[in-house]
Structure formats: C-alpha cells, structure tokens
Amino acid sequence: MTLQAFALLAAAALVRGETPTKVPRDAPRGAAAWEAAHSSAAAALGKLSQQDKINIVTGVGWNKGPCVGNTPAISSINYPQLCLQDGPLGVRFGSSITAFTPGIQAASTWDVDLIRQRGEYMGAEFKGCGIHVQLGPVAGPLGKVPQGGRNWEGFGVDPYLTGIAMAETIEGIQSAGVQATAKHYILNEQELNRETMSSNVDDRTLHELYLWPFADAVHSNVASVMCSYNKINGTWACENDRVLNVILKQELGFPGYVMSDWNAQHSTDDAANHGMDMTMPGSDFNGGTILWGPQLDSAVNSGRVPKSRLDDMVERILAAWYLLGQDSNYPAINIGANVQGNHKENVRAVARDGIVLLKNDDGILPLKKPAKLALIGSAAVVNPQGLNSCQDQGCNKGALGMGWGSGAVNYPYFVAPYDALKARAQEDGTTVSLHNSDSTSGVANVASDADAAIVVITADSGEGYITVEGAAGDRLNLDPWHNGNELVKAVAAANKNTIVVVHSVGPIILETILATEGVKAIVWAGLPSQENGNALVDILYGLASPSGKLVYTIAKREQDYGTAVVRGDDTFPEGLFVDYRHFDKENIEPRYEFGFGLSYTNFTYADLELTSTATAGPATGETIPGGAADLWEEVATVTATITNSGGVDGAEVAQLYLTLPSSAPATPPKQLRGFAKLKLAAGASGTATFSLRRRDLSYWDTGRGQWVVPEGEFGVSVGASSRDIRLTGSFRV
Ligand SMILES: *[C@@H]1O[C@H](CO)[C@@H](O)[C@H](O)[C@H]1NC(C)=O
Ligand SMILES: *[C@@H]1O[C@H](CO)[C@@H](O)[C@H](O)[C@H]1NC(C)=O
C-alpha cells in the first residue's frame, strides 16, 4: 500500500463524534464452555491407559520433536502429537510468519481493538502452522525493575492495563482456535539468578499487582498457565502448593492446566501433588534428567501421587484441547507454512500508534517537505551482517525492533528508518544524507547543512541465556546504548533542529539529551518490529498524529524508581509502590510520567459524570474463572466528553485514576482503573466511558483473605496522563 492510500484509510477510520472503544469490554465468559469441555475430557479419560495418561502430561524431551514442546499422540481418542511453540509475539522458528510487535508496544497504543486484532492474527498464524499451544502472552515480569531483561515481552508496569491487554490478547488468540498460555507465573521480575532466587512478597502486594493480570487471563478462559523458574517463599513456583493449588486453582477457579517453564520442574511428587499438570520439555536440556514419565508412573503406582491427581492433570489438559475445538479438523504441524496474510497491517498500526511523542518544540514535527534531511545512527539501517544473523535477535546491531531471547522471532523482512525515509523523501524531492554508525566523527559534515537532523538511538535487553554487549539479559543501566548521549550531542552541536528517535525496550534516562541545546523533538518509538521505519515515517510526516502513551515512568535519575535488579532473594520491600505509585507517594517529580504522550493536536476534557451502585464489603460471589463472580460486575460508570480542539485529526487516551477512601489501609495515591482511546477528527467530540468493576474499587484484605470495597469517598481523576489530570470528582460508598 502506498503511504497516501494508508493515510486515507487511517483518516477514514476517524469517525466523527463516536466512541470507538469501551474499556473494559464485556467479553464472552465461559464457565459453561469449560464445563462442557471437562465433560468431554472426563469421558475420554475412560479410554486411556495409565501409560497414555503419563504420556499426555510428560513432554517427549528436549529437541525431540517439531516444536519447542511436544507430547505423543494418543490414537484411542484421536489426540494429536501436541505442539507447543514460542512465543508471545509470533511463531518462533517460523520461516514465513509475521514478526508481530512486542507486548510493550501493543500496550503503548492503549487501543483494545488493535490489541485484540494482534491476538487474532497471532492465533491465525499459530493455527496455520498446526501449533496447538502458543506460549504467550506475558504478564510476568510485570516490570517492577526498569532494567528487567524481559519487561518488553509484557504490557507495561500497571496491572490494570496489563490485565486488559492479557484479556484482549488471549481472547484474540483463542478465537482463532489456539490455546493461549499466560506466563510466567509468578514473581519472576528479573533475569539475574532467576533459576535460583526466591521472591518473597506479602499477600496484598501479590494480589493487587502481580496476580491481578493473571486473574484477567483466567477470566478470559486462558487454556494454560506456565509456572516460572524462581522460588516463592523458598518453594519453587512449579511445586508451590499455595501459588498453584490455593491461589490459581481454588481462589481464581482456573479450570485449565499448569505447564512448567522449560526445565523449571524440580521434583516428581511435589510438582504433581502441588498443582503442576504438564512438564516441559519433559527432560532437562541434556536429555538426561526426567522427573515425570517413568518416575511419575512409579509415584502413582506406589501411591505417593494419587491416581485421581494424574486423572485431574489429564482432564485439565484434554479439557483445554476440547475447549478450543482442536479435536476436529486441526491443521497438521507445519512450522514452515506461509501464514502471513495481511497481518503486517496490524504490525504497522501498532508500531505507529504505540509511538509516544515526548517533546516537540516549535512544532518542528510533523516535517514539512524539507529540502534536506540528515539521518544518523547505526539503528537507522538494517543490521549489516544480516537481518536475522543473531540467533534469537541476540545482538543490538542495526535497527531495533524487539528484544532478545525465546520471546523473539526471525523477521520476514524489515523496513529500517532509512528505507522508509528514503522512499518518502523521493516523493517530496528531499535529499537524505546518511551516517549509519554511532561514531561521532564525521557527524557534523552530514548534519550541519540539513533542515533537520534525525538521530536514532537504542536500548536493548532480553533473556539471560544470551549476553549482549555485557548485558546478561537485564540492562546494566538506563543509559542509551552505544554512547547515544554523545552521538546526540554531536548531532545537535551541528544542527539546531535535531530530532531524537528512541527505539528501546524500556525507560532510559533522558536528562543529558534534554539538556542539549538544539534537541527540538524526542520521538519515543519503542519496539516496532518489522514495520520500524514505516511507522516512524507515518508519525514524522504527520500521516497520523502520535497517540501512544507511556506504559512506564521515565525518571530523571535511575535511583528514583526505588527498585533495581536484586542480588540474592527479592523481598519486595517496595510493596505496592512500584513505578508511578512510588513516584506519587514519595512526591518525586518524574521526567515523563506514566500515561504521558503528546499529539499534533489538542484535546479538552469536560462534563465528568459519575454513577455508582457499589456497596462496601467483601466480594462473596461464587467462584468463576477469575475469582468471585461479583468482582467482575460493573458497579460504577464514569463518563467525560473529550473534544479535539486542535487543527488536525488525532486520537486521545483518556485515563481514569481512582483514589480509595482513607478507610482502606495504606494504598497508592492513585491507581489506573480505566482508559478509553477516542479517535476524533479535528473539532469533533466524543464520550469516554469508563466502566468500573467491583474489583476496580477493591483492595485485598489480607486478614480476611478477600477483596473488599472500602467504605467512604472514592476520588476520581480523569486526565491525559497520571499527572495531567483534567477532571476530578468523587462518589461515596
Ligand atoms: C509468603 O510469606 C509471606 C510472609 O509470611 C506471606 O505473607 C505470604 O502470603 C506468603 N506468600 C505465599 C505465596 O506463600
Ligand atoms: C494546542 O494548544 C496550544 C496552546 O495551548 C497552542 O499553542 C497550539 O497551537 C495548539 N495546537 C494545535 C495543533 O491546535
């Protein structure tokens, strides 16, 4: 599609005065669907020998099948060789697949329709490859440690936003007939020592931050949950009775199965008796140690693991297979299938609408047919050693589209900033001069006579089994890589119209760059995957107005976050006070706050209206997938009128933050409990509707072991970010 055609389509999507999205969405909920699936599974159990059952719960071993995880076929019930494949942004090792945008970019759009479509398209690709189980999406790490290596795989540091994104993604994937896996459960917040450390967190923080998005996943009928590598209170996650049996299966009413992360199992009996249902990949990475298979068989025969427990594992696994309708007409496994369809359109839209404009002095953006542009940085071009030359994207060479590790995929193609800019420049007769390295020498020559100089810098991270430029997964600090600050200074010294583009896995400290005279704009372009350059050009040229908002805080100093990579065990001393909850409590001025993002237009907020039928006290409903049923009931509605008062079409993410009454024990000053993205043509108004569920008004009462709506006055703040509050109101419960 040409850029003009794309712009026309984007403009056509702007519906004057209409609210395109409503959050949270009333999704199909399925206790009944699970019941039918469990009946089918229970019926199938009768046809299985004990050996069949052992086979269904035990992977065939590392590197022994077509997928990263495999279990053997069981012919008596037409059960296939089950294929489980990475990862959260597409089919790992696929050859004709789409490299979808990472979760962090999807979240940055705050657009539930794009997030849902991303899930649907990913599901279609996994199904097209005959894969039964997609190993994603990611709600853990949540991202409490800004340097955390795998934060980019998830949806940002707020549990409410992550929960909505988990629900939309899972419902999207599963609507295509593929089992989704919510991972990594739970409290695995860093790469360093992830396979030895213990995460010890109090019960309230566990519920209100880390468990919250997993409850959304269960409520959306996620088929599977993956237990993580770490210990919790000294007990491995994959044999932790409280975490698996008590919290996940009883409290959240999870009807599906728990699979281990790869080689995260440490015992035969405890794993079985404490809630794990499937071991992956079935052996250690040398193929030597096998903890289930024959070991589980003897444990069952000797009564150490009850037969009923083995039956329960199998019933859960088969129920998920029936739930997704995978027992009829499922495609054969073919990871090499061409499944791309038109899915790159979603990649481009998410890459573009996840871009956050941080600074735009003198209206330097959008660009207005400049005669000459300079483009600077190694990240302006495709990795000169080859697009996929680094295994699992384990390097930071050339343009950045995703972090590294098992959550990465090979790119089918890659449009780098220079590729897209060159194409666009040709249309306008603009000259583009390129300096495709991070060395400052020679920069002045390229930058000095241009109308504007665009400099691209990066920060990367990934999974700890690969070390990149000294970073074993987690980032070493929050500075841009490759001396990005020095590169920006050199460019800005030569050109007073410098535009800084940041491709990054998470926050970096921007103080040096902001203190550099000549830096007029900062475009926070995140992780745009294969559509990197196209998305950037869409924003630089105003084909779309920027509409992304930060899903984490950008601090002035690294130590301002109050959390960092921990050596030894993590006792979570910060409790609930993570990211903006911490900055608000401690009165620390962030550089750019959670939820921040500029636009090429302006929005005004008016007419706050609130209604509530909420009653104080604990949730007492029957347990459905996700917890007590009444937690999910809408008990309050807030509306506001948003008007595009500026000169161009755009979209605004209106955000609702709730302040609990003082009768609730020490609670963060404000917590995100609603958002709505409104696409509004210039001059148009729309209504943002925020539906608050009982859980959104509740805190976790540790003494009672229940979610409780406190009595008193609830403060409502609606605004353009967590600190740019435009309307306030309150209601009493
Ligand atoms: C971990 O231990 C703390 C302190 O005893 C307790 O409050 C918490 O509930 C425990 N968490 C789990 C998951 O066992
Ligand atoms: C937005 O409002 C500011 C003043 O508040 C004004 O300077 C600017 O021109 C407006 N932008 C647009 C695109 O209307």
Image (spheres, rainbow, N blue to C red):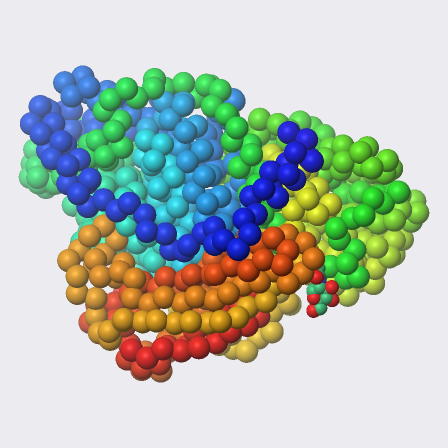
Quadrant of the image containing the N terminus: top right
Residue 50 shows in this picture: no
The quarter holding residue 284 reads: top left
Q: Residue at x 64, y 52 (%)?
A: 649
Residue 587 shows in this picture: yes
Front residue (pair 266, 180)? 180
Front residue (pair 28, 578)? 28
Quarter of image, ligand 1: bottom left
Q: Residue at x 19, y 46 (%)?
A: 31
Front residue (pair 417, 409)? 417
Q: Residue at x 23, y 41 (%)?
A: 256
- Residue 157 position in % (x across, y down): 47, 58
Q: Residue at x 27, y 58 (%)?
A: 632
- Residue 89 position in % (x across, y down): 48, 37
- Residue 597 position in % (x across, y down): 61, 59
Q: Is residue 434 above or below residue 619?
A: above
Instruction: Name the side, left or right, on which 212 lies relative to 496.
Output: left
- Residue 703 position in % (x across, y down): 22, 73
**Number of numbered discs:** 0
Q: Is residue 340 above or below residue 646?
A: above
Quadrant of the image containing the C terminus: bottom left
Instruction: Name the side, left or right, on which 137 lies relative to 538.
Output: left
